[in-house]
Image (cartoon, rainbow, N blue to C red):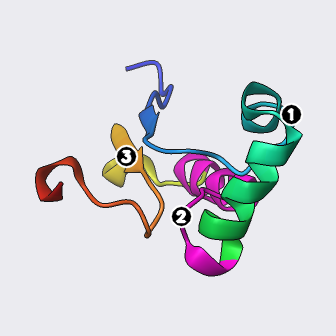
Amino acid sequence: PKGIHVAHVILDGAVDAPDTLGKMLGPEMFEQLRATRGREHDGLMLPEKIAESYWHLSQQHRSTWTHEMDLRSFGDRPWWNH
């Protein structure tokens, strides 16, 4: 009724972000993770692609709003396939 679009966005996986994951893992482990699961392996979520998903949410017409979105990398298997 107020015209405010609220969405719950789940980031289900590791984000390729040196300022967060990189500090948590340490530089060496982060670079190893990037080498084994990074861009060409589709195992880490890319911040610029996450931003594109948020931008898409902000541009939706109110007749077709998304209220929940689950983002994960292509390389991660869903929990039911483990």
Disc 1 packing (10 Å; few <14; some 14–19; many ≥20): few
Mark 1 or mark 3, earlier in chain: 1
In-front residue for pair 36/40: 36
Distance from Cα at disc 1 to Cα at disc 2: 18 Å
Indicate the secondary structure of the residue bearing disc 1. Answer: loop
The reply to whether callout 1 and callout 3 are in contact (CB within 8 Å) is no
Residue, disc 2: 43
The tag on residue 19 is 1
Disc 2 packing (10 Å; few <14; some 14–19; many ≥20): many
Q: Is residue 44 above or below residue 8?
A: below
Locate residue 3, reporting x and y percent.
48, 27
In-front residue for pair 2/78: 78
Locate residue 13, reporting x and y percent.
48, 44
Distance from Cα at disc 1 to Cα at disc 3: 23 Å
As drawn, is 66 to the left or to the right of 28? left
Residue, disc 3: 70
**Three-letter residue code for mark 2:** Gly
Disc 3 packing (10 Å; few <14; some 14–19; many ≥20): few
For the magenta stretch, what is the residue range? 40-58
As drawn, is 34 to the left or to the right of 37? right
Magenta span main SS: helix
